[in-house]
Amino acid sequence: MQVTKKKTENATEVFVEGAIDTLSSPKLLAFVEEIIASGEYNITVDFKGVDYVSSAGLKTFLSLSRSLEGKGNLILRNMNAKVKQVFDITGFLPLFNIQ
C-alpha cells in the first residue's frame, strides 16, 4: 500500500493505493494521525486506488473518525463497488461521510 497527501484550501486529501489490510492499516493510521496531530482536522481519503479493505482497515477508519470527533470531518470518496459493499455489509456505511 502507498499513501500520499495533498493539502487543499479546505482539507488534506489522502490518496491510498493498494489493499488496506492487517499489514498496511497501521501505516495508514499512523500517516493520518500525524496529519491530525499537526492540526489538520478536515481529511478526505480517496479510495480510487484501493481494491480491498479488511476488518483491520475498517477499524482504522473507525479510529480516525473517533480521533476527529468534535474537531473536524473525515470524508471517504471514490470507493469502488467492492469496497463500498464491505462498508455496507459490515454496517459501517452510515457511520461515514462517503462521497
Image: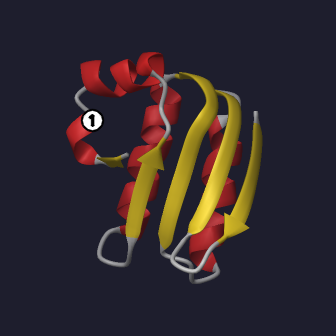
As drawn, 80 above or below 82: below
Identify the residue shown where x is 22% and y is 29%: 91
Question: What kind of element bears circle 1?
Answer: helix
Residue tagged 1? 93
In this picture, residue 24 sits left or right of residue 67 = right
Where does residue 11 sit, x and y in percent of width and height?
A: 54, 72
Identify the residue shown where x is 69% and y is 57%: 31
* Residue 21 seen: no
In this picture, residue 83 sits left or right of residue 50 = left
* Residue 13 seen: yes
Where does residue 72 sit, x and y in percent of width and height?
A: 38, 74
Residue type at mark 1 is: Leu
Q: Residues within 10 Å of mark 1 (few under 14, many from 20)?
A: some
Where does residue 13 sit, x and y in percent of width and height?
A: 61, 61
Where does residue 77 sit, x and y in percent of width and height?
A: 46, 44
Identify the residue shown where x is 27% and y is 18%: 89
Q: Quadrant of the N terminus?
A: top right
As drawn, 56 above or below 94: above
Identify the residue shown where x is 71% and y is 65%: 6
